Amino acid sequence: MTSMAQLGDLMAQAWVSIRELAESHKETERVLKENAAEAKQRSIEADKRIAKLERRADDMNRRMDDANQRMDNTLREMGDMNRRMDNVTRQMGGLNNSIGEIVEMIIIPGVKENMNALGHNFNIASPRKEFSGADGASLTEVDLLLENCEAVMAVEVKTRFAVKWVERHLTRLELLRKNERITGMRGKTMYAAVAGMHFDADARELAGENGMYIIEIEEDSERVSVVTPDNPRTW
């Protein structure tokens, strides 16, 4: 039979076991609470990182939208520029054609008639006369060349005459005379004229000072009038 002393020992051991179980349970609860708190903190930090990434993605999307908008604007501007360039090209083509038409329809008959009335007696009128050098390369071009057996007249035509066009014509005349063997002007007297619808005052003065005939094109009547220089120059 179990003695009272043995029973007391068993009960004491049981209480010890119970206390140990209780302590173990408390420790388990503490660890679980710490783990739960740590997990919650990690979740909060993860949410913050996700929110930050989402903000970055939104910012990147906005930047991409801005970049696309700028690209669209640039493409539209380039399209407008191309259209303007095409328009300028068409206008330039039209301008070139109009000068050609002016030379052929107005200046040739009008200038030849007026110059012959002044005693020049030109019997040949060549529009857009081209000259080549000894090597076959282009030497120069004259908008209208009037000539006979003894003399020639080089006429430069512009819708509007500025000083630079007069200066270039002077250079062209020197070039023609310098290469007279090639241009067929050896032994011929060379005169010069400038023809246009509008003349800058300085251009008109420079042409007159250099003994050039000034041919004014009257748009409304499609006729020309010739201003004779005080001292016609020859080259």
Image (cartoon, grey):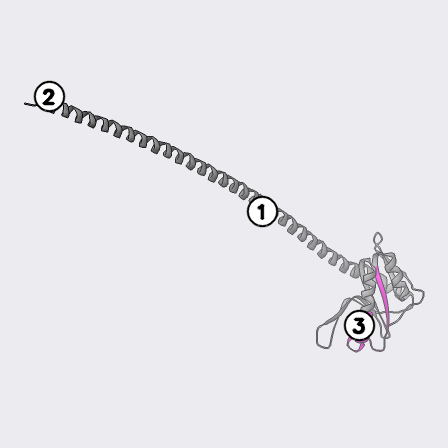
Marks 3 and 2 close (CB-CB < 8 Å): no
Say few, some or many: other residues with alpha carbon within 10 Å of mark 1 (under 14 / 14 to 19 / 20 or more): few
Query: Closer to the camera: disc 1 or disc 2?
Result: 2
- Image quadrant holding the C terminus, namely bottom right
Say few, some or many: other residues with alpha carbon within 10 Å of mark 2 (under 14 / 14 to 19 / 20 or more): few
The type of residue carrying mark 3 is: Leu
**Quadrant of the image occupied by residue 196:** bottom right
Residue 27 point in image, percent of width and height: 29, 31
Q: Secondary structure at mark 2?
A: helix
The type of residue carrying mark 2 is: Met
Of the image marks 3 and 2, the number of the one nearer the N terminus: 2
Query: Is residue 177 located in the magenta-colored stretch of the structure?
Result: yes
**Quadrant of the image occupied by residue 4:** top left
Of the image marks 3 and 1, the number of the one nearer the N terminus: 1
Residue under pointer 3: 175
Residue under pointer 1: 71
How far apart, in angstroms, are the residues tagged by discs 1 and 2?
Answer: 99 Å
Q: Secondary structure at mark 1?
A: helix
The answer to whether residue 120 is above or below residue 218 is below
Give the residue drawn at x 72%, y 53%.
91
The type of residue carrying mark 1 is: Met
How far apart, in angstroms, are the residues tagged by discs 3 and 2?
Answer: 146 Å
Q: Nearer the viewer, residue 34 or 201?
A: 34
How far apart, in angstroms, are the residues tagged by discs 3 and 1?
Answer: 52 Å
